Image (tube, rainbow, N blue to C red):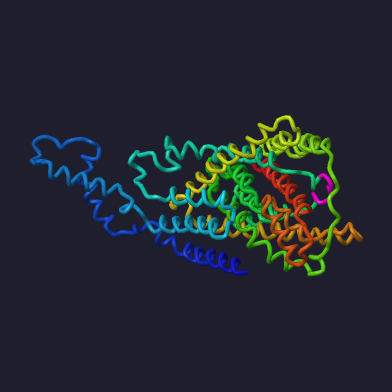
Amino acid sequence: MKRFITVIGIIALLALLWSGMEHFAGLPVFPVASANTHCMADTGSNISGSMPAPGTGHIYNSGSKALDGLSTFFSFSGFVNITWANVFMIIIGLVFIFLAIRYEYEPLLLIPIGTGIIIGNMPFVQDAGLELGVYEEGSVLNYLYFGVLKGVYPPLIFLGIGAMTDFSSLISNPRLMLLGAAAQVGIFLTFLGALSLGFALPEAGAIGIIGGADGPTAIFLSSKLADGVNVLPDGTTVRNLIGPIAIAAYSYMALVPVIQPPIMRLLTTRKERLIRMKPPRAVSRLEKILFPIIGLIITALISPSSLPLLGMLFFGNLLKESGVTRRLAETARGSMIDIVTILLGLTVGASTQADVFLTPTSVLIFGLGAVSFMIATAGGLVFAKAMNLFLRGGDRINPLIGAAGVSAVPDSARVVQHEGLRYDPTNHLLMHAMAPNVSGVIGSAVAAGILLSFLL
C-alpha cells in the first residue's frame, strides 16, 4: 500500500504540473537567453565563418574575437536554450529511473527509457546543423530511432520472448487461453473511447493496444497506424503518437505490481482467492515442439497482419524447444534481446522531446492507457469468475489468475503468485498464471493484427 500511495502521488503531482505546463512550455528557464539573442545576431557572420566586408570600419582584434567566440559558445549552450518544458520532461526521466532503482519496477526498461528522456530533452539549437536530436535526419539517434519508426525492434523482442517462454502450462490446460483472450477487451473498449474523444480511426487503434500492456506490440502498431506519415481519407495526416503510446505502454507494464492488486482484491472474494487448482500435467517434448508450429499456422491464418510479431515469437520458441539449436536460442534470449531492449528503450525515451511530446494529446493517451489497462485486468478476473459457474470441484479456477491475461510477461503472473501467497502461503499460482499470461501475449498480437488489417 505504501508503494501504491507513493507511485500514485508521484503520478498525480506530475499530472498537475503537466496540466499547467502548456503556458510555460516555451519560456526559457534563464532570462539571460533573451539577452544573448542580440549577441547571436551580432556575431551571426562569425558563426557562419565569414568575415565583415572591407571598408565597414569594424576593426577586429584578438580580444573582440575571443569575446565573440565566448558569446557564440554561450548562445549554443543548454543554459540559454533550456525551457521549463525541458525541465519537466527531465524530471519525468528521473522519476522513471527512481522507480526502477528504488522499487525495481521493470528496471531493464525504465532505466533506458528514463535515460533516453533525459538525453532527448537536453536543449540544443535545432537549426544549427549539429544533427543531435532524434528527429534530425543524419543524427545518430535518428538512425537508431529508425528501428522504432519502421517497427524493426518489436519483432526482434518477440523472438527473444519466444526463446525464453515455456508454453507448458498453456498446453496442459488450454482452456486458460480464454482468460488471455478475455483480457483483450480493454483494447477494443479503449479504441471506442479514443474515437469518442476525437482521435482518427488509425490513431484510436494505436492507442487502444496499450490495454494489452505489451510495449513491443504497442510500438509495432503505432509505427504503422500513428506514425505522422499516413494520410487520412479527408486529406489530413495522422499525428505521430509513437512516443506517447510507447511511454504509456511501458509505464503501465512497469506499474503492474501497483495497479493490479487493488483491482484483484476489489473483484474477488477471500473464498475465491483461496481456491486451489490441480497441478498442471506433464507435457511431452513432442507437444512442446508441435505447439509453436501449429500456433504459427493457426494465428497467421486468423490474423496475417500479426505475422511479423507472432512469426518471430513462435520461431524463437521452436529454437528453444527443438533441442538442436541451443546456441541460437541462447543468443535470441540473451545478448540479442538485451541489445534490442537497450536501443528500443533509449530511442523511445529520446523521442519524447518536449516540443513534440508535451501536448494535451499525450495527457489523453496516458489517461486512456490507464483505463485500458484496468479494464483488461478486470476483464480477465470477471471472465474467470464466469467460467467457475460451469466448473465443479477441483476443476474450478482461482479468479486471481485472470489478472495475468494482460501480456506483461512475467510480471502479471508474479503479481498473481504474490497475491495468492498473501492469503494462503502454500497456494502457488505461478505456473497456472503463466498460461493466461503467455496467451495474453498471443492475444494482444492477434488483436494488433486485426486492427492493422482494418485501419491501415
In terms of secondary structure, what is the magenta stretch mainly? helix
Q: Does 174 lie within the magenta span? A: yes
Q: Quadrant of the N terminus?
A: bottom right
Q: Residue furthest top?
A: 324
Q: Relative to 129, does residue 389 appear above or below in the rendering? A: below
User: In x, y percent, where is residue 70?
Assistant: 22, 47
Residue name at image x 52 percent, y 65 percent = 10
Q: Nearer the viewer, residue 185 or 120?
A: 120
Q: Quadrant of the C terminus?
A: top right
Number of marks in the image? 0
Q: Which residues are magenta?
A: 171-177
Q: Nearer the viewer, residue 304 or 159?
A: 159
Q: Relative to 19, does residue 362 appear above or below in the rendering? A: above
Residue name at image x 57 percent, y 66 percent = 8
User: In x, y percent, where is residue 447?
Assistant: 71, 46
Q: Does 62 lie within the magenta span? A: no
Q: Residue furthest right?
A: 392
User: In x, y percent, where is residue 21?
Assistant: 44, 62
- Could you tell whether 302 is left or right of 33 in the image? right
Q: Relative to 268, does residue 453 appear above or below in the rendering? A: above
- Could you tell whether 398 is left or right of 308 in the image? right
Q: Quadrant of residue 403?
A: bottom right
User: In x, y percent, where is residue 128?
Assistant: 33, 41
Q: Residue furthest front?
A: 426
- Could you tell whether 282 is left or right of 349 in the image? right
Q: Quadrant of residue 226?
A: top right
Residue name at image x 55 percent, y 56 percent = 100
Q: Nearer the viewer, residue 53 or 176?
A: 176
